[in-house]
Structures are given as structure tokens and as C-alpha cells.
Image (spheres, rainbow, N blue to C red):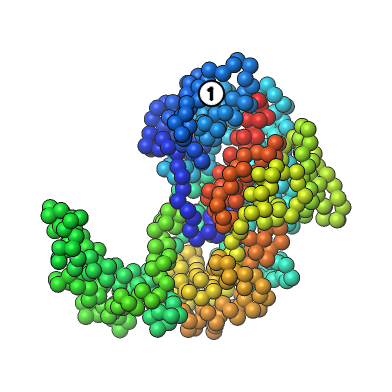
Amino acid sequence: MTAGSLAPHRARRRVCAVWPTCFGATGCASDSTVRSCGDTQLRDPAPVCRGASELDIRHFRTRKGRTVSNSQPRSMSRRLFLDRVGKAGGSAAVVRSMTAMGLFAGSTACDGPFGLDGATDFDDLNPRSGRGEDPRARVIILGAGVAGMTAAYELRRVGYHCRILEAQNRAKGRSETVRGGDHIEEFGHSQICKFDHRPGLYFNMGPARIPYHHRGVLNYCKKFGVELETFTNDNRAAYFHNDAGLDGVATPGRVIHADTRGHIAELLAKAINIGALDETVGEDDRDQLLEMVRSFGDLDADDTYVGTSRAGYLPHTHNGFDDSDVPVPHGLSDLLRTDFWRFKLRFAHSTSQQPTLLQPVGGMDKFARALEARTKSVIRLRREVTAIRKRENGVRVIYRDYHGRERAYEADYAIVTIPASVLRNIDADFSPAHQTEIDEMVYSRAAKIAFQSRRFWEEEDHIYGGISWTDQDITQLWYPANGYHAAQGIIGGGYIWDDDPGERFAQMSPEERIELALSQGEKIHPQYRAELKHGVSRSWLNTPFIRGGWRDSPTPVALREPDDRIFFAGEHVNNLAGWQEGSVISAHEAVMKLHAHATS
């Protein structure tokens, strides 16, 4: 989801080929006028960063080693030149070329080893430097989510006329934070959130966390004054539960982690001691490796795992601890019969889930609201797009207004941020390549449910933020990372994204969802049913004009490029599917490419 995210885990990113030089603390080492290597959201390796001051940009080396020279006929248009530069070196090369040609007046503000720039300095974008069309061209943007509002915000700052059409009766897309009194509309039913009207009683139905390296979102938060606080993702006091393993007993994460490490370390220590690794580990390293393994698993003097204080202490311990107070470890076979090791134990190790994670104070929609406040005058709600038509020098969009009347809007360009799950049902003149990717894109069945409650998880389980895991449909319980020690809090009673559970959840009534969450959650917290109230849920699969959580299929290729004067943006277009950062980056890419076209 445009999200920060709904996605629990994303695939490994492909990064700029020149990161050893260009991702230092101050940016590009090759030219002090360039603070970074620009838009690092590359599909092909970037050329060596020579600096924006080198106007000639003599050579770009392609992935297959071919060299593209600038020794082209003088009659080559800038548009054709930029197109060829992009094919050779990716969008980073386009940005540097545009800077050198005067289409960008300055540098970019990104740095970081993940290619997650999202922070292009549009203050320096110069729309009047081109010789082509009127720089105050009209742009129609379809969708008022994070991507659409980001594109409008940046385009308007440099003189473009923008209009955003949004089918829903609110902006912000999947960035939805529910509070008392809010309406939740789905196909076939609606709900009203009944949380008490108190500060801190909210729940993020969409994106809920911002990784520290999502620089685009974080830069906007800083620029717009969106206050942030720490989001607790991994908490070893939270529980692991598996119906088929450990007798179905919910077990603190610290125990599962400690016992797993201990058994692995014991096996490796035995292998070292009998010489099974002698061909791999040299004599000089053997003793150091054995010491490392002992420390890793907290083994005893016989290199045996007999339990550890890392797993915590027995409940009766109150006034001090000693070794006799540690719990008896679970056996290796018992651990292997659970599903913890398949994904859950390593969840917090993935790049997108590592600390530090952040959240806006008061709800994730504070970020989207800040964008909305700066684009509100051009947003038109309850405008359902029914057709997208190419014209010789522009785009024509047919839509249905809130009275049901069909209307049309013509513009020089369009940026389409509508999810592919909805876009595929709109009559459009897309190219076969673009239409195929739209038709074949798969979306997650993401869903969430939340309850208001006394903070029993803090008072009785000593859980302050974090996630409990279960192999049941509800998958996760989320504990609030705000309002500690308040009388009431909002607990996430389920976060679902797998296909079958998500499909089942989407087909349930709100009352059935509540019963599901209560019956499964009380296996983790026995007091659950007696404590929880005011349940409210969201199935993104069952949500009009959304129809899915995030792109759950390979990153598109065609959609990352324009279709004549139609450009595409959104988390589904970017490698960072399911994250708000993906929406921001894709919007920046669309803005840069549109501007290159408009000024060439």
C-alpha cells in the first residue's frame, strides 16, 4: 500500500552501480556540485558519475558493455537524446543530462546505498528552460493517493496547471487512519469506528511504519513539519504461537530466539569438535570460530545448550535472578515442528523491517494530510474515471461526477496513479505492452482489524509495542507504539496478507471478522474476549476503487515508461511495492520524465 507499509517484506533492491563512489556522507565524490548520483531508482547500471558540470557527457556504458557515444548528428532533438541517454544509463543519467542542459538548474538531494532517493530537489527544476511547449502545461492526475498528490505538489511548484480526479469521497488513497466516528466503506457493507474520542486512539488501516532509509517520505515529513516518533516492530516480549507446535502455547519471542540460536550453536560446536569442518576452517580460525559459536548460543562448558538467561526468567522470580531461574529450553524437534523458522524469526532482519522505524505522531495519515493540504485546491473528489483517450497533442479523460453526469477533461499530459486492479476495468487507449502489464498485475489480499481495550498487554504481559505472530488467519497482533501507560489503547487484532486468509476475510461481514479475531486472538491472550471492544476492520480487496493491498507480482517494465503523453506512478509501478516510499519515488520519476518531454 502506498504505504510505509502494509507490505511485511519486500524483495531485495537493485541499486546504482556506482554506489561505492556516489553514496558517501556528502554524495558524489567525482564532482562537488553534485551531492549524489541523482535518481538511483535504476533498472540498468548507471554510468560512472562524472558530475553535472561535464556538459559533453561523452560516453555511457550499457549493461552489455556497449558504448553509446555523443557523436550524433547535430540535428538530434533533445527529446531523442534524452531517450537514448535513458536507455543507456537509466533515469539517473537522464537527470544529470537534464541538469547539464539547463533543464534542471541544480542538483539532487539523495544519498544512500539502497537507491531509495525519493528526494529530488524540485526547487531547482526549471520549467522555462525548454524551447518546446508552454511550460505551464496542463496535467491531469488520476488518483489522489500519495503518488498523485506528490506529483501534483511538485508540478505545481514549478508552474504546471494540475487537476486531480479522485473516485472516492476522500483523498489519501490507502493511507487510512481510522478514529472514532470515521466511516469505513466496502462492497456490501459499511462500518462506523466507535473508538473513544481521545488522543492516541487511532489505528492505521493502511501503511503504518516508515523505515529509516525511506528518504523521500522522511524528507517530506521534515519539510512539512510532520512530527515523528519511534515505531516498535520487533519486541521479544511479544508472542509466537503455532497451533501444531509447542502444544499450541503462545511463547515469548525471546524464548524462541534464544532456543533456536542455542540448538544451532550446539550442533555447529559439535561439528567443530569432531573435526567435521577441518577442510573448511583452518587451524588458525578453529578456536576463534568455536568461541564465536559458544557466545552465539550461550553454550555451557561442554558446548551444550541447556538454556540461557536470554530467554528470560521463570514467572515466580521477583527479587533477583540466578541460573536456576531460567526456563527449560524447548527441544530442537519441537521448534522445527513450528513454522517460526520459515519467515517469522528473520522478519525483523529484512532491510525494510530493521530499526529504526518511525511513525507520524497521531497517525500515519498525518503525512498524507500534509500533502493534501498543499494540493487540496486542485483535488476533485467523487470523480470516477471511465475512459482515457490519447489525442494528437494531449490526453482526454472521461469521468462521472458525483451527480452521475459524464464529463470530460482535456490536458496536455496525464499521470495515472489508479491501482492496476481498478485501471484494468477502465476503457483506455494504452499500448499493448502497458495494457498487458496492467491486466496481469496481481495484488495482495491485505486486511486489518483493530479493537479498543484496556492496556492489559502492558500491565500483565509487559509488552510495549511490537508484534505477536500466529499461524492462524489473523497472522499478527500489533501492540501500539504510542500512549504507553494510558488507560486505553488500540490493539491490532489481525494483519492478514496471504491469499487464502485474505480472501476469506474479504467475504466476511464485519461481525464475522470480529468473531474470527476474538476466537483466534484468545489463544495468545486468554483475557482477549473479555477486554476488547469497538472492533473495526478493513479488507483492501473488498474496498471500492482500490481492490487490493499492494502489487504482489514482479515489478513492471512498460509502466515505468510513458505511453505517449500518459505517465504512470504509484507503489505498483516501483520496486518498493506496498510502501509509501515507492509511491513518492514513482511520482518523482513521472514528474522528471514529463518535464523532460514538455521542455524538449
Q: Is residue 450 visible?
A: no
The percent position of residue 568, horizontal first and vertical second, equals 65, 44
The percent position of residue 596, horizontal first and vertical second, equals 63, 30
The percent position of residue 204, horizontal first and vertical second, equals 57, 62
Q: Amino acid at mark 1?
A: Ala
Which residue is at a point 51% across and 40% down the rendered structure image?
Answer: 43
Which residue is at a point 42% across and 56% down the rendered structure image?
Answer: 350
- State the quadrant of the N terminus: bottom right
- State the quadrant of the C terminus: top right
Please, which residue is most extreme toward the left here?
A: 283
| Image-based side of 535 in relation to 110, left or right | right
Q: Quadrant of residue 332?
A: bottom left
Which residue is at a point 70% across and 24% down the rendered structure image?
Answer: 132
Q: Foreground residue, 245 or 283? A: 283
Q: Is residue 441 visible?
A: yes
Which residue is at a point 74% across and 55% down the rendered structure image?
Answer: 425
Query: In the image, is residue 200 above or below residue 166?
Result: below
- Mark 1, residue position: 100
